């Protein structure tokens, strides 16, 4: 079984709808992250969480919110989706410290029409 | 803030060597990661450099010069399966990663 899972894997929704993307991990990591990827722009950090009670904004948090329901679960919400939020979204986890690599989920492809 | 530059695309022949450069300007630099990402898939870890010098791992090597804000990823004995995007990422305080735009490598027969 995959260490980091994301649901749904693909989603098409309409402008103005509320969408939740879910992430679960079995690696026992405290740190979890949400990124979006757009062609030519690499991965950009939306939100990150170092433990259940710690939530931080990344570089592009506007229009998004998150919830850390448990150590293993970190959800990303789009309160009112807009077309420029069409992107590939990745969840990632890591252990503590600067040298720990991040492990990525398989991604959610979101299309907002 | 952070600024990371890497070429957009490179083409090489199977069996050859390709070097992907990455330059960065950042505050609070801790280390530099390289990830591989096949189209539509998740990035996977290749290497991590924190000290100056070359780290070799099989066919892949990564170099870092902290004073020059420069790294490269060297791929030797290229195989068709190496066709992918290669992401350079800098880590600062709190293990937050800032990614470059990625370099798409196309390996031709």
Image: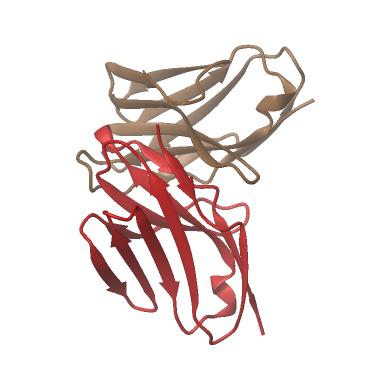
Chain colours: A brown, B red
Residue A1 visible, this angle: no
Write down the quadrant of residue B103 in the picture: bottom right
**Where B15 falls versus B52 (above or below)?**
below
Q: Nearer the viewer, residue A82 or A70?
A: A82
Q: Quadrant of the C terminus of chain A?
A: top right
**Where A63 falls versus B35 (above or below)?**
above
Q: Residue at x 41, y 34 (%)?
A: A24
Image coordinates of residue B10 in percent, x first then y, are 61, 68
Q: Nearer the viewer, residue A43 or A93?
A: A43
Image coordinates of residue B63 in percent, x first then y, are 32, 66
Left or right, residue A42 beside residue B54: right
Q: Nearer the viewer, residue B23 or A1?
A: B23
Q: Residue at x 30, y 33 (%)?
A: A31
Q: Residue at x 19, y 40 (%)?
A: A97
Residue reaching furthest to the right: A113
**Where A58 falls versus A89 (above or below)?**
above
Residue reaching furthest to the front: B68
Image coordinates of residue A13 in percent, x first then y, are 74, 24
**Where A92 falls versus B8 (above or below)?**
above
Residue A51 visible, this angle: yes
The tally of labels here is 0
Left or right, residue A17 beside residue B87: right
Q: Residue at x 40, y 57 (%)?
A: B34
Write down the quadrant of residue B79 in the picture: bottom right
Write down the quadrant of residue B67 in the picture: bottom left
């Amino acid at each position: 079984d995959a260490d980091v899972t994301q649901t749904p894997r693909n989603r098409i929704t309409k402008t103005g709808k509320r969408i939740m993307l879910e992430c679960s991990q079995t690696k026992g990591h405290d740190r979890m992250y949400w990124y979006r990827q757009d062609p030519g722009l690499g991965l950009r950090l939306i939100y990150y969480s170092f433990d259940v009670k710690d939530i931080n904004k990344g570089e592009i948090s506007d229009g998004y919110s998150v919830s850390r329901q448990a150590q293993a679960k970190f959800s990303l919400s789009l309160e009112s989706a807009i077309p420029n939020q069409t992107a590939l979204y990745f969840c990632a986890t890591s252990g503590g410290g600067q040298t720990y690599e991040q492990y990525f989920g398989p991604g959610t492809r979101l299309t907002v029409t | 803030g952070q600024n990371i530059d890497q070429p957009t695309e490179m083409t090489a022949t199977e069996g050859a060597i390709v070097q992907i450069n990455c330059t960065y300007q950042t505050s609070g630099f801790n280390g530099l990661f390289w990830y591989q990402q096949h189209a539509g898939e998740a990035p996977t870890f290749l290497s991590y450099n924190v000290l100056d010098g070359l780290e070799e791992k099989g066919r892949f090597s990564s170099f870092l010069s902290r004073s020059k804000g420069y790294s490269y990823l060297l791929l030797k004995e290229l195989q068709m399966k190496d066709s992918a995007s290669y992401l350079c990422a800098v880590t600062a305080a709190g293990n937050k990663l800032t990614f470059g735009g990625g370099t798409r490598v196309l390996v031709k027969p």
